[in-house]
Image (cartoon, grey):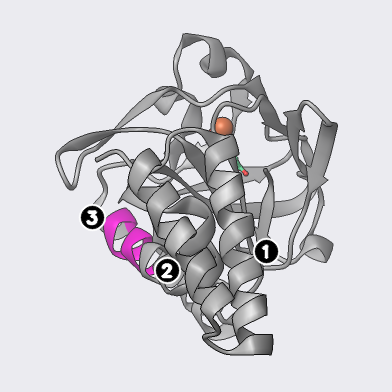
Amino acid sequence: MLLHLPEVLSREEVAEIRAALAEARWVDGAASAGPQAQKVKQNKQLPADAPEARTLGERIEAALRRHPLFQSAALPHIVLTPRFNAYERGGHYGNHVDSALHHDPFRGVTARTDISTTVFLNDPDEYEGGELIVEDTYGAHEVKLNAGDAILYPSTSLHRVEPVTGGVRLASFLWTQSLVKDSEQRRMLFELDMTILRLRSQLGDSEEVVGLTAHYHNLLRQWAQM
Ligand SMILES: O=C(O)CCC(=O)C(=O)O
Ligand SMILES: [Fe+2]
């Protein structure tokens, strides 16, 4: 499941984060990729252990955690500290799958990557190219969102960032270990949760709504792993 999260960051937050990124020290992104991804990666990143990356990353994480769709769709167990990348002058990231495990130097934890997230920090008209393409069994999906919006996709999917042929594409990206490892189970829980929300707004806490809510929690109890 690909999910668009609108307005994770406000316009003001985007502007503040971009101002801080303009002052930050950037390094070659290939250094932090595995052997396959390294060959197809051409971008810049903030060093994963840079103090300024931590402060900015924690702002992104707090904003995501406030977003009701993120909670429901990701069912986060561990959110790794968000990182930052920049693509310009033909910068791109060819087809790859994210490494199964990632270490968070700030928290000293290693997490399984179940869900990948990109938070866009530029509007689409600020750069040429730079689409995030995510492949799943239904084909290839092209994603280019407004500044402050985010996309969630299963970390199992092959994906790439097309060359940026004009302007600069800035983004924050991160991985989440979900309480529910299986993406189909997560999708069913998300759809059930959204349906219950709609029913509750129509019917209030009727007996049926309470019954479905019990099913939701009992399924989550079956499937959640910590
Ligand atoms: O820049 C993006 O949207 C995705 C980056 C990415 O795929 C990665 O760093 O693994
Ligand atoms: Fe990736």
- Numbered mark located on residue 61 in the image: none
| Residue 216: x %, y % from top left | 47, 58
Question: Quick check: is the Cβ at mark 3 less than 8 Å away from ligand 1?
Answer: no
Question: From what the image shows, is residue 127 above or below residue 109?
Answer: below
Judge the density around disc 2: few (<14), some (14-19), many (≥20) Cα neighbours within 10 Å: few
Residue for badge 1: 122
Question: From what the image shows, is residue 102 above or below residue 53?
Answer: above
Name which of mark 2 and mark 3 comes first in the sequence: 2
Observer-nearest residue: 226 or 210? Answer: 210
Residue for badge 2: 20
Q: Give the main secondary structure, helix, strand or loop, of the magenta stretch.
A: helix
Q: Quadrant of the C terminus?
A: top left
Quadrant field for ligand 1: top right
CB contact under 8 Å: marks 3 and 1: no
| Span highlighted in magenta in the image | 53-59
Note whether residue 14 is visible. Answer: no
CB contact under 8 Å: marks 2 and 3: no
Mark 3 belongs to which amino acid? Pro
Residue for badge 3: 51
Name which of mark 3 and mark 1 comes first in the sequence: 3
Name which of mark 2 and mark 1 comes first in the sequence: 2
Q: Quadrant of residue 110?
A: top left
Mark 1 belongs to which amino acid? Asn
Q: Is residue 54 magenta?
A: yes
| Residue 211: x %, y % from top left | 50, 68
- Residue located at (55% from left, 75% from top): 209
Observer-nearest residue: 5 or 212? Answer: 212
